Structure formats: C-alpha cells, structure tokens
Amino acid sequence: MDKNQLFKRQITLAEIGEIGQQKLQNASVLVVGCGGLGSPVAVYLASSGVGKIHLVDFDTVDITNLHRQVFYSLDDVGKSKAAVLSAFIKKRAPFTEVSFTNNPITKENVFELIERVDIVVDGTDSLPTKYLLNDACVIKNKPLVYGSLYKFDGYVAAFNVLQKDGNYSANLRDAFPEMAADIPNCEEAGTLNSIVGIIATQQVNEVLKLITGIGKPLTNQLLIYNSLENTQLKMKLKPTVLKDKIAKLFKVQTYFDIACSTQNPDWQISPKDLKSKLGDENLEIIAVLPNLNLPFKVDQTIPIQEFNADKITIDISKTYVMVCQRGFNSYKATEKLKAEYPDLKVFNLTGGISSY
C-alpha cells in the first residue's frame, strides 16, 4: 500500500506536507482509557498516521457504553476494550503499530508506561487517574493532552508542554491544585454522546499540533466547551505548581480508584442470588445512583455523594444490598456500611444492574 496515497488529503495541506506526515509516522502516543474519549482519540490518531500507539484500559465493553463509544458493537459486549480497539485499528491503519495493556494504570506502573512514548493522552473518567497521569508526566517531562467531561460540558488542555524558553507550561494542578472529593463520573452524572465526540476530536487536534509543530496548542489555558449553548471559554493558567512540589506529592499520594481495584468477594451477591431473594421481608435494597432503570423495587435511593453510613437507620436483623449501574459506586457504599457496622449483612450487587 502506498503511504502517500493513504494520507494524500492530509499531505496536501501545506502546513503538514510530507515532512509533517513523517513526524506523525515517527511519533508514539500513549492513550489511557479506551472509552468515550480514548477510543475515538486512538482511532483518529492512527488514521492520521501516528506510528506507534499504546492503549491502556482494564475494562470490558458494557451495553451502556455503546451510545457514545461508537467503535464497539453489540458483539463486543463483555470483551476487553483495549483488545477490541487494538484489533479495530489494525484493520484500518496499516502504518500504525498498536499495542495494549489490559490492566489499570497505577502508581507502580505509570512511569514504565509513559517513558516509552512522546505524548500521553488522558481518556479516563477517573479523577485519581487524571492526577496520577498529570503528576507522572510533570515528573518525567512528558506532555499530557487532557480531556474531561461533565454532563454537557467538556474540558481540554495541553499540559506540561516544553516552551521555547526551556520551561514547561501549566499542568492540571495549576487549574485544580487539589483532587476534589466525590466528583461524579459519567455513570453518576450522565453524558450526551455528542459532547464526548467533540472533546475527543479536540484532544486529537492538540496531539496533531504538538507532533507536527503547527498551530497554537492549548497551553497555559483550559478550554471549557458547553454543547447546549455552543459556548466556550478559555481559563488562563500560570505554571505555579512546579515539578519539585509535584514530586513530593507523588511520594505521599496513593491515587487509589475503587473502580480499578479488586473487590472483596465476601461482600458480593450475584444477580442470580439476588433474584432468588427478592420479596424477602428481611432484604433491603439501596440504590446509590438516582434515575436507574431498575428491574426491581428498591427500598431507598441515596446518591453516593450523599451516602453517609452513620446517618442511615439500620436494622441489624436485615440483609442490605447496594446497587448501581456497574457495581463500582455500590461497592463504595458497601465499604462504608461495613466500616460503620462490621457485623451487618451487607452486599454489593456484582457487576451492577448491567449484569442483572
């Protein structure tokens, strides 16, 4: 296959040309998260001719992903996202070497993963992971293309980019110095598929500019776009939280995310076992996400952000089951109840409503 023919429309751009195309071919990118942001980012980058892409995602395709994660199909449900996406890219990007890691990115493996690449792309919806990537990229002098979503809003920035004066541009901690508590992800807050695609392609745009050296990257600013009003603003940033401080933070922070952790098997109830117990007067079911489309009646709905174990009236003779969409937030609630009432019979619905 003729490479110039495949990328003809892109090479035709005077700002790209054959030199820019070769820069793309020589580049390597790490895409962390293969969901709504990461999957289109990876496909568009490969389609643009980026030479090496490594995907990182521990998750599997769920039916609730498909409305916005458009490079997966019904046949992919239950399969590894990273593996499916890698196979898809290989079919359409012959000049891209794609590989994947089917495990969470953690404090223990983050340096090994980012050292291999030129640019890191944050396609996650995990706040601890976003700070982990930011801090690791600052420590290792790697540019990070950030993307984030909240309902109808999207956020994009090119963090920690080397400037002409030899210094590095602002990073995530210059916008938000501390990790906020109980910020809902898209499972909790919901999201419209159009904003997901808009922000993903904005991230692709930043990566292409950084690699080819054209245009003006989103450095020292955070772009905030609202899809309902078609409005955007740019939050100006100054690099004030520098490498030395972030290195000290890295030593003490765990960046722990319950969604990436192993759940206690003794605190689980399978969908089959729950079905057999429905109707039992000693069973109490608590949903920790509002507006769930539930196939059974729940006794209480307490959003995980408001879940306070010591303020819930408990009957020690009852069995409690926590439910959410995929079993992550309900496990948080289970942990909180077990911590407050160690002898209470409380279980997490394994896999959430998606597995019921």
Image: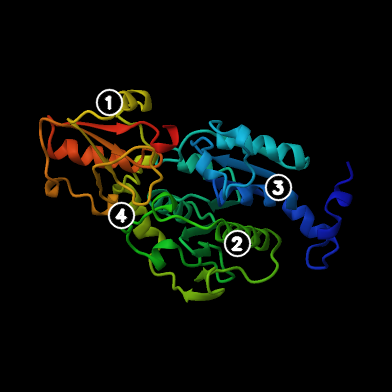
| Colouring method of the image | rainbow
Tell me if mark 2 has few (under 14), some (14-19) or many (20+) residues whose alpha carbon lies within 10 angstroms of its own.
some
Q: Are marks 2 and 3 in contact (CB under 8 Å)?
A: no
Q: Position of residue 205 (x, y in %)?
A: 65, 62
Please name the residue that numbered disc 1 is placed on.
Answer: 277
- Among numbered discs 2 and 1, the one appearing first in the sequence: 2
Marks 2 and 3, how far apart in space?
A: 18 Å
Q: Amino acid at mark 1?
A: Lys
Tell me if mark 3 has few (under 14), some (14-19) or many (20+) residues whose alpha carbon lies within 10 angstroms of its own.
many
Marks 4 and 2, how far apart in space?
A: 25 Å
Location of residue 237 with respect to 336 vertically, above or below: below
Q: Which quarter of the figure is the N terminus placed in?
A: top right
- Among numbered discs 4 and 2, the one appearing first in the sequence: 4
Marks 2 and 1, how far apart in space?
A: 44 Å
Relative to 143, is 273 on the left or the right? left
Q: Nearer the viewer, mark 2 or mark 3?
A: 2
Q: Are marks 4 and 2 in contact (CB under 8 Å)?
A: no
Q: Residue at x 49, y 37 (%)?
A: 59
Please name the residue that numbered disc 3 is placed on.
Answer: 46
- Among numbered discs 4 and 3, the one appearing first in the sequence: 3
Residue 182: assigned label? 4
Q: Position of residue 340 (x, y in %)?
A: 13, 40
Q: Secondary structure at mark 4?
A: loop
Marks 4 and 1, how far apart in space?
A: 32 Å
- Among numbered discs 2 and 3, the one appearing first in the sequence: 3
Q: Nearer the viewer, mark 4 or mark 3?
A: 4
Residue 315: assigned label? none
Please name the residue that numbered disc 2 is placed on.
Answer: 198
Q: Nearer the viewer, mark 3 or mark 1?
A: 1
Tell me if mark 4 has few (under 14), some (14-19) or many (20+) residues whose alpha carbon lies within 10 angstroms of its own.
few
